[in-house]
Image (cartoon, grey):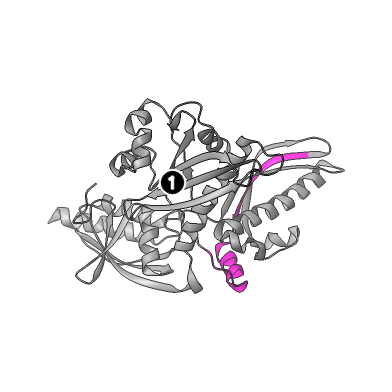
């Protein structure tokens, strides 16, 4: 009895702390980091002021593009650099260097989430704000000698290694190609889509899905330069494999490596847009889900709560009841219930229906699943 009473006191204290500001940190998709600036002016102070103004405008544009579909980028609201200040929550500076007339730095901005959401809705633009788990990309290239993945040369893999990360909602992970990778998946297993082997490799890189991107360089059918044909197959534990095809013609003055790099960018952009389409917050609709979280200890709940804090579409976590074996909460969220399930999955949480109720488990421990 004394043990149960002590745990009850701990739970009460924890509930009080959890209700206080700063009890948890939500993953911030409204933060834009590493904006490089280099400005020369009459004085260092003037150069710094202009650099910050230009930097926040660049970060603002990057954020709006991160949240919206590429087809809507031409319709994004346009502001003068100085007008962006009202949307900035705060900013920080690193790698700062100055001279008498020059200012160089890397700027990091956090924007006001509600103001950005309101801006996009007022502009009639749909947007997504759920970050995806990393997606592991395996670049398979059709060379004259046959299919290559880990072997050198693999110009397709090199193209992926050289591309700049876009900083969107989908983080793409590239395998190291070390002995562990080589022993885990060979090129034939990748092409055949052997899910078990691909899943183990994805686990090594803390990725969710795996993409096998097959590329072949050949002559353009019209005889003008080369063309790259790409087949992109996405393997997911939750869905059937999905394959998409694309072909890019060589541009004037573009070498083969440039064409492959453009192909890698096109594949990455397609993965980003597909994720956004599946997670668009239509009309800003809000919902509340009554959820039961089974626990065996206070540590269980602390772990689940920390993950919930990282889910972008969850706006509030209202604790209704806490006991020794479960916590009941109301999750206030935006979007549809299926989008909530998808977003929770990106934080390794599984929301399932049991006896007409929502129950939340760490991923892999719900009844009928395995780790």
Classify 256 as above or below 122.
Answer: above
Q: Nearer the viewer, residue 1 or 180?
A: 180
Q: Position of residue 98 (x, y in %)?
A: 76, 36
Classify 259 as above or below 295.
Answer: above
Classify 79 as above or below 180.
Answer: below
| For residue 280, side relative to residue 11 (left or right) | right
Q: Is residue 109 magenta?
A: yes
**Residue displayed at 57% across by 46% down:** 265
Q: Nearer the viewer, residue 236 or 67?
A: 236
Q: Is residue 120 magenta?
A: yes
**Residue displayed at 33% across by 60% down:** 15
Q: Which residue is outermost to the right?
A: 42
Q: Position of residue 165 (x, y in %)?
A: 56, 43
**Residue displayed at 31% across by 42% down:** 194
Which region of the structure is painted magenta?
103-127
Q: Position of residue 270 (x, y in %)?
A: 52, 53
Classify 295 as above or below 45.
Answer: below
Residue at the spot of label 1: 134
Q: Position of residue 316 (x, y in %)?
A: 41, 65
| For residue 31, side relative to residue 281 (left or right) | right
For residue 349, which quarter of the picture? bottom left
| For residue 285, side relative to residue 30 (left or right) | left
Residue 167 appears anywhere in the view: no
């Amino acid at each position: 009895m004394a043990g149960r009473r002590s745990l009850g006191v701990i739970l009460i204290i924890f509930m009080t702390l959890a209700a206080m500001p700063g009890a948890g940190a939500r993953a911030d998709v409204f933060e834009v980091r590493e904006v490089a600036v280099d400005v020369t002016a009459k004085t260092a102070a003037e150069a710094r002021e202009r650099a910050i103004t230009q930097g926040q405008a660049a970060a603002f544009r990057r954020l709006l593009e991160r949240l919206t579909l590429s087809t809507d980028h031409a319709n994004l609201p346009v502001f003068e650099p100085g007008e962006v200040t009202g949307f900035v929550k705060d900013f920080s500076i690193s790698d700062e260097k100055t001279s008498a007339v020059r200012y160089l730095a890397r700027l990091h901005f956090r924007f006001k989430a509600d103001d950005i959401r309101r801006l996009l809705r007022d502009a009639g633009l749909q947007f997504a704000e759920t970050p995806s788990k990393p997606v592991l990309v395996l670049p398979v290239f059709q060379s004259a000698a046959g299919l290559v993945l880990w072997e050198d040369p693999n110009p397709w893999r090199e193209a992926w290694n050289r591309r700049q990360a876009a900083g969107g909602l989908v983080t793409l992970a590239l395998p190291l190609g070390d002995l562990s990778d080589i022993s885990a998946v060979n090129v034939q297993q990748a092409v055949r889509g052997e899910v078990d082997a691909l899943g183990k490799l994805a686990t090594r890189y803390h990725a969710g899905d795996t993409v096998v991107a097959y590329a072949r360089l050949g002559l353009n059918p019209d005889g003008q330069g080369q063309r790259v044909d790409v087949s992109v197959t996405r393997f997911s534990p939750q869905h059937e494999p999905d394959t998409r095809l694309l072909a890019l013609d060589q541009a004037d003055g573009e070498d083969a490596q440039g064409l492959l790099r453009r192909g890698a960018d096109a594949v990455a952009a397609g993965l980003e847009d597909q994720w956004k389409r599946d997670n668009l917050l239509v009309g800003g609709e809000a919902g509340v889900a009554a959820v039961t979280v089974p626990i065996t200890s206070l540590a269980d709940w602390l772990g689940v709560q920390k993950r919930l804090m990282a889910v972008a579409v969850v706006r509030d976590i209202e604790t209704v009841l806490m006991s020794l074996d479960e916590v009941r909460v109301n999750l206030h969220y935006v979007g549809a219930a299926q989008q909530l399930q998808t977003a929770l999955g990106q934080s390794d949480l599984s929301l399932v229906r049991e006896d007409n109720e929502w129950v939340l488990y760490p991923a892999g421990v719900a009844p009928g699943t395995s780790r």
